[in-house]
Image (cartoon, grey):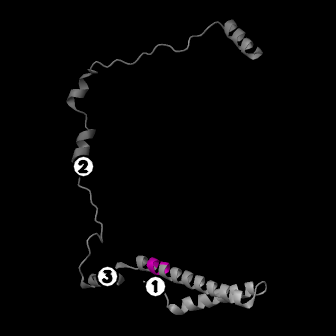
Amino acid sequence: MMIGNILINLLSGVVGFMLTFLVTYGNNLLMTSLIRGLFGFITWFLLAFLLRWVLGVMMKQTEPQELTDPAAGDGEEALGARLNISTPDEDEELKNLLKPKPAEGNGDNGGFTPLNPPKLVTMKDPEELAKAVRHLKEE
């Protein structure tokens, strides 16, 4: 599940130790720098371990099914491996829907009357409208 080996973790830890030790040696005592370098080694070692584990999980998820499943080589297909979609023929039903029915051709609208809504806007005298606009502008 993990990529690489422990050598990658050790090299990463050594790099972390060296960086931390060299940065802290100029401002601290030797013992303090060594202790902080050790903490840097442990931190970088664990980060490399975590990175290897995450990459291993990601690589395992992206591998093809044939390589990860030994039973797949037997010639048996796993359930859900293929998707076969086909639609039934509905040509006759579509043709029947497009044909006009004899009951529709007699001209009876079944009591349908178009909507005649009342007028919502009534036109007032233009002089009154101009007076109202002048009044609103003044306020």
Query: Circles 1 and 2: CB distance less than 8 Å?
Result: no
**Judging from the image, what secondary structure is the residue with disc 3 in?**
loop
**Residue shown at 64% from the left, 6% from the top:** 125
Characterize the local packing of mark 1: few (<14), some (14-19) or many (20 or more) Cα atoms within 10 angstroms.
some
Q: Is residue 61 left or right of residue 95?
A: right
Name the kind of residue labelled 1 in the image.
Answer: Met
Residue 68 at what x, y percent from top left?
A: 35, 82
At 24% from the left and 50% from the top, the residue drawn is: 90
Number of residue marks: 3
Determine which residue is flagged by label 2: 91
Q: In the rendered structure, find residue 69 and report the number of the disc placed on it.
A: 3
Instruction: Pinpoint residue 55: horizontal percent, then vertical percent.
Output: 49, 80
Amino acid type shown at disc 3: Asp
Residue 70 lies, in percent from the top left, at 29, 85
Density class for disc 2 (Cα within 10 Å; few <14, some 14-19, many ≥20) is few
Instruction: Look at the image and give the residue range highlighted in magenta.
Output: 54-58
Q: Distance between the residues labelled 1 and 2?
A: 56 Å
N-terminal label among 3 and 2: 3
Closest to the observer: 76 or 139? 139
